[in-house]
Image (cartoon, rainbow, N blue to C red):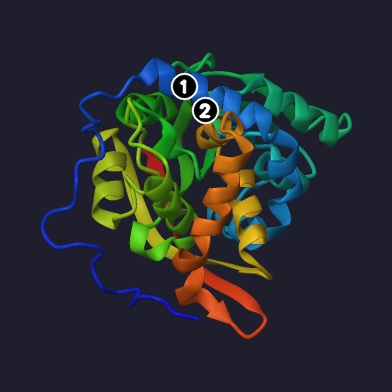
């Protein structure tokens, strides 16, 4: 398995400003696509969660949950992380919140009436919760998909109690996340450029970029550490299905493609996956940044 030096910078020069959006980016369209995409893949996203168990555990360990706390999980999708949080407490409340109401419905169905776990549809940039309502805030692999991330972070700070802790996970730099990058390169090679640009899933993949975003929202950053998300695939088709199970808004666009185009995309993945080839299939190590911050 090939992997970059984890201590090497992702790129030269100053970290990019994640608040600067593409020139022709349409935030309303983006939210519609993300909502539709995560509604579409909700069941498969939940079913594939076992591959992210170690990542969820690392995030929850960093959150240091305590019985009796009120916890908000943003970009919760079908509530996998929220459910894991609820199981760590014998008393308290976890609210799973997402813009995709269909994904939340899937999570509610799977929760089976756990009284510690509630589901509430909300836009992270306009949270419908009272000031200082939560002791902890979780956001797993979600911050990079909020168009106005600064506004979303300000909302997160608002709903946190003073001294409350927020824990985030985001994809690392593109070169260190082959799970996502290989598919995106194949898509760019086969499909024409999009008429409206999408947000980069790697926009917070540099530590200083993430640190500046959190600090700019008035959060005290305690730590930012790299976590490895390892995955293995028997064949390119298995990899492709895993990507589609995570793809959110991209999943909606892919679902609209003709079958012959999808087949070509699957074929084009082989050269992208070649560096990760092993005797029994493909193995990848992906970098996720885990950040812990507090509201002072």
Q: Which mark is residue 34?
A: 2
Q: Is 273 situated above or below 241?
A: below
Q: Is 200 situated above or below 197?
A: below
Where does the image place residue 133, in percent across and percent down from the top left? 54, 23
- Residue 227 visible in rendering: no
Q: CA distance from mark 1 to mark 2?
A: 5 Å
Give the residue at x 67% y 81%: 280
The residue at the far left in this view is 13
Q: Is 200 situated above or below 6?
A: above
Which residue is at the front of the view, 144 or 255?
A: 255
Question: Left or right of 12: which side holds 140?
Answer: right
Q: Is 281 situated above or below 81?
A: below
Question: Residue 114: which quarter of the image?
Answer: top right
Give the residue at x 35% y 35%: 199
Question: Residue 26: which quarter of the image?
Answer: top left
Give the residue at x 67% y 60%: 238
Where does the image place residue 207, in percent across and percent down from the top left? 29, 56
Q: Which mark is residue 22?
A: none
Under tag 1, what secondary structure?
Answer: helix
The residue at the far bottom in this view is 279
Question: Left or right of 255: which side holds 31?
Answer: left
How packed mark 1 is, by other alpha carbons closer than 10 Å (few <14, some 14-19, many 20 or more), is some
Which residue is at the front of the view, 128 or 253?
A: 253
Q: Which mark is residue 31?
A: 1
Where does the image place residue 125, in percent across and percent down from the top left? 42, 21
Give the residue at x 46% y 67%: 271
Which residue is at the front of the view, 184 or 153?
A: 184
Q: Are marks 1 and 2 in contact (CB under 8 Å)?
A: yes
Where does the image place residue 76, in percent across and percent down from the top left? 61, 35
Query: Which quarter of the rendering shows the C terminus?
Result: top left
């Amino acid at each position: 398995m090939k992997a970059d030096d984890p201590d090497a910078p992702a790129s030269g020069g100053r970290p990019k400003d994640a608040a600067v959006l593409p020139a022709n980016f349409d935030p309303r369209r983006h939210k519609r696509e993300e909502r539709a995409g995560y509604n579409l893949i909700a069941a498969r996203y939940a079913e594939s969660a076992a591959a992210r168990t170690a990542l969820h555990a690392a995030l929850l360990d960093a959150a240091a949950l305590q019985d009796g706390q009120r916890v908000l999980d943003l970009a919760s999708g079908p509530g996998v992380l929220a459910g894991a949080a609820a199981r760590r407490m014998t008393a308290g409340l976890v609210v799973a919140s997402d813009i995709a109401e269909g994904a939340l419905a899937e999570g509610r169905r799977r929760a089976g009436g756990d009284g510690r776990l509630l589901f509430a549809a909300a836009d992270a940039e306009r949270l419908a919760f009272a000031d200082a309502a939560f002791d902890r805030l979780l956001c797993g692999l979600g911050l990079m998909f909020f168009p106005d991330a600064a506004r979303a972070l300000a909302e997160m700070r608002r709903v946190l109690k003073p001294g409350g802790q927020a824990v985030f996970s985001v994809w690392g730099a593109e070169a260190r996340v082959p799970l996502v990058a290989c598919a995106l390169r194949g898509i760019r090679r086969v499909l024409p450029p999009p008429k409206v640009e999408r947000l980069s899933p790697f926009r917070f993949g540099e530590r200083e970029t993430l640190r500046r975003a959190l600090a700019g929202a008035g959060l005290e950053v305690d730590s930012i550490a790299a976590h490895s998300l390892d995955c293995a695939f028997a064949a390119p088709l298995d990899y492709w299905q895993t990507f589609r199970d995570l793809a959110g808004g991209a999943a909606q666009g892919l679902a609209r493609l003709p079958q012959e185009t999808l087949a070509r995309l699957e074929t084009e993945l082989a050269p992208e996956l070649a560096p990760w080839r092993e005797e029994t299939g493909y193995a990848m190590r992906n970098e996720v940044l885990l950040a812990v911050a507090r509201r002072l």
